[in-house]
Amino acid sequence: MQNRTFADLVAGGWCRLAFEPFRTGVEICWLEKGANDEAPSLALLKYAPGARVPRHLHRGLETVVVLEGAQADEAGEYRKGAVVLNPAGSEHSVWSAKGCVVLIHWTRAVLILGETRS
């Protein structure tokens, strides 16, 4: 397997990457998608202004780096340059009032708690 490089990703290179729908108001660009929910994944998330991700449980460590804008949860707001570590067993919901782009790494997939499916 060969290493992959994402040139200037943190400095705005993410703008040249393709995103796809992920959740209402949130798009995703998979940099490395785990083979299943137990495998790690790395992605970029792009939040439209006002977008939210419902309350969820972290089944593994989630690491977030805010590349543009600001992301918030119940503990506060995290602006460009912030690094947020959400340990296994923690829960929160996430939103962005004005929109943002984050680099996110999950060691295991999260479990959505605050949403019902029809």
Image (tube, rainbow, N blue to C red):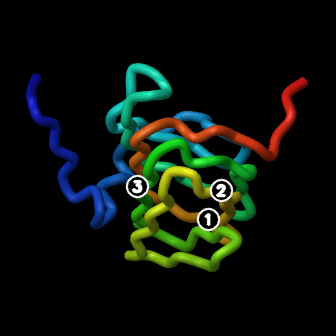
In the image, taking residue 86 as reference, residue 53 lies left or right, namely: right
Give the numbered dot on residue 99.
Answer: 1
The location of residue 72, given as percent across then percent down, is 63, 71
Residue 66, located in which quarter of the rendered image? Answer: bottom left
Camera-near label (3 vs 1) is 3
Residue sitting farthest toward the left: 2
Camera-near label (1 vs 2) is 2
The kind of secondary structure element at disc 2 is strand
**Crowding near pointer 1: few (<14 within 10 Å), some, many (20+)?**
some
Give the numbered dot on residue 103.
Answer: 3
Pick the front one: 98 or 90: 90
First of labels 1, 2 by sequence position: 2
The residue that appears at 44% across and 64% down in the rendered structure is 85
In the image, taking residue 72 as reference, residue 1 lies left or right, namely: left
Q: Quadrant of the C terminus?
A: top right
**Crowding near pointer 3: few (<14 within 10 Å), some, many (20+)?**
many
Q: Which residue was labeled with disc 2?
A: 91
The location of residue 86, given as percent across then percent down, is 50, 60
The location of residue 41, given as percent across then percent down, is 39, 37
Camera-near label (2 vs 3) is 2
Q: Quadrant of the N terminus?
A: top left
Amino acid on which disc 1 is placed:
Gly
